[in-house]
Amino acid sequence: MKLIILDPGHFHASLLLKDTIRQVNDTVFVYAPRGEELEQFLQTIKTYNSRKDSPTSWVLNVYDEADYLEKMIPDKKGNVVILAGNNKNKTKYIYRTIASKLNVLSDKPMAINRQGFELLEKAYQKADSNNVYLYDMMTERYDILNIVEKELIQNKELFGELQQGTPDDPAISMESVHHFYKEVSGVPTIRPAWYYDVEQQGEGIADVTTHLIDLVNWKCFPEEAIDYKRDINVLYATHWPTKISLDEFTKSTRLKEFPNFLRKHVKDSFLHVYANGIIHYQVKGMNVAVKVRWNFQAPDGGGDTFNSSIKGAKAVLKTCQDKQENYVKQLYIQKNDKISSKKFEKNLQKTIEKIQITYPFVTLSRPLPDGTVRIDIPLGKRAGHEEHFKHVAKQFFEYLANRNMPDWEISNTLAKYYVTTKAVEIAKEGN
């Protein structure tokens, strides 16, 4: 594989190159406009190349003139284009690249509004006719807790059938909390100003929820094709802003004032960023609620968090990551009151023994007073978020090499972006 990096405005572009990738040529071609975003990307790769432990050996061939996109397409220096940057341009980049018969590995979100969704659907149609692949970077599939939870859900003797739930009491609930100011690879992340513009970055319910909806599809309907026209019904969506002070904005971007394109979102000296929201929807008749929140900075000792609940006929699976858990993500299972403790414990032990064939470090804690059991996974066996990117890349490159990307990857990606972009429309109508 020969990589082309197009307009790398988000640090996820550099994370894909954090480690040497066996299937990839060391020479990487970069096409981007000059500016701080490009310089930050180049500096990060330089750091990876020069580190003491397991240094990489990337050779970057950079074209940084204003016509970078028009230059990249006829050059065709590689066969896989990596996209991670301004989401206002991303769907157009995707379509132009696919139309040029180049494969695309794209950071989320691939679309942030209805127009983007419609163009994304056309891009998939064009990819099919041009015999190229388009793939979404769904890193959360490689979190070991999600992998184990998927196994537990699919064991019907233990978990039972997924419950339907109701709009007021969903079968599946997920909440993700993120922070604008954070460190990546030990260095504070400098956000571009456009990251705070929902017309360029996308609203929170168009962005982070892509991971949550993907996990719903991947865990609860594995390898099942989901048709957004037939299987999806978006019931309700709302959103609200995170208020960012000028001091916080300066700390995050190094800019001394809000740029002109953001000033229409400034009220009472605070920048209002619609980064928070809730979506209630149905997939194959099952009721789902996803929620995203963005704060400026995590509390001391904290970080991004994720909490979820998935209800089966025989048990409920819960993921908790909060102050009570010292911000460490933990997975729990609680039996249904109608199931005998003896039968539940037997099925749980049997299921864990099966999981231990592949993941021998997975064990069970002693039951809590309410019968809840924690699925113990040592911290040393958990790869961090930054490590998940190489697994996404490896999966995509295997699909490319074997020409075997399953159809459900495409239909389920479209279903996901239908939910997010439809939700943005509904939330705006409710303002």
Image: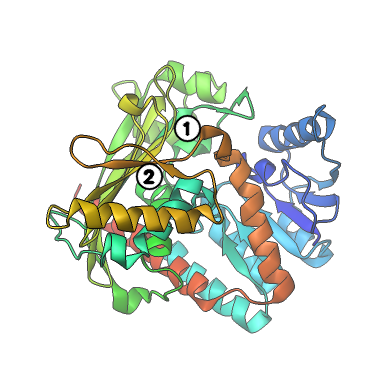
Q: Describe the element under mark 2 as helix, strand or loop.
A: helix
Could you tell me if the residues under marks 2 and 1 are in contact, i.e. CB atoms within 8 Å?
Answer: no
Left or right of 160: which side holds 376?
A: right
Left or right of 183: which side holds 247?
A: left
| Kind of residue sitting beneath label 1 | Asn
Residue 367 at what x, y percent from top left? 27, 39
Label 2 and label 1: CA atoms lie apart by 22 Å
Residue 260: assigned label:
1
Residue 306 in view of the camera: yes
What's the residue at 81%, 65% (across, down)? 76
**Classed neighbour count for the residue bearing mark 1: other residues with Cα under 10 Å, few (<14), some (14–19), many (≥20):** few
Q: Is residue 242 above or below residue 274?
A: above
Residue 204: assigned label:
2
What's the residue at 77%, 65% (across, down)? 79
Residue sitting nearer the eye, 45 or 386:
386
Q: Mark 2 vs mark 1: which is more N-terminal?
A: 2
Q: State the residue lying farthest toward the bottom.
A: 129
Residue 184 at what x, y percent from top left? 60, 30
Residue 331 at what x, y percent from top left? 37, 43
Residue 192 in view of the camera: no
**Classed neighbour count for the residue bearing mark 2: other residues with Cα under 10 Å, few (<14), some (14–19), many (≥20):** many
Q: Is residue 252 above or below residue 133?
A: above
Q: Describe the element under mark 1 as helix, strand or loop.
A: helix
Numbered disc in front, either 2 or 1: 2
What's the residue at 80%, 67% (across, down)? 74
If the image is split into quadrants, where does the N terminus sit? bottom right
Residue sitting nearer the eye, 162 or 64:
162
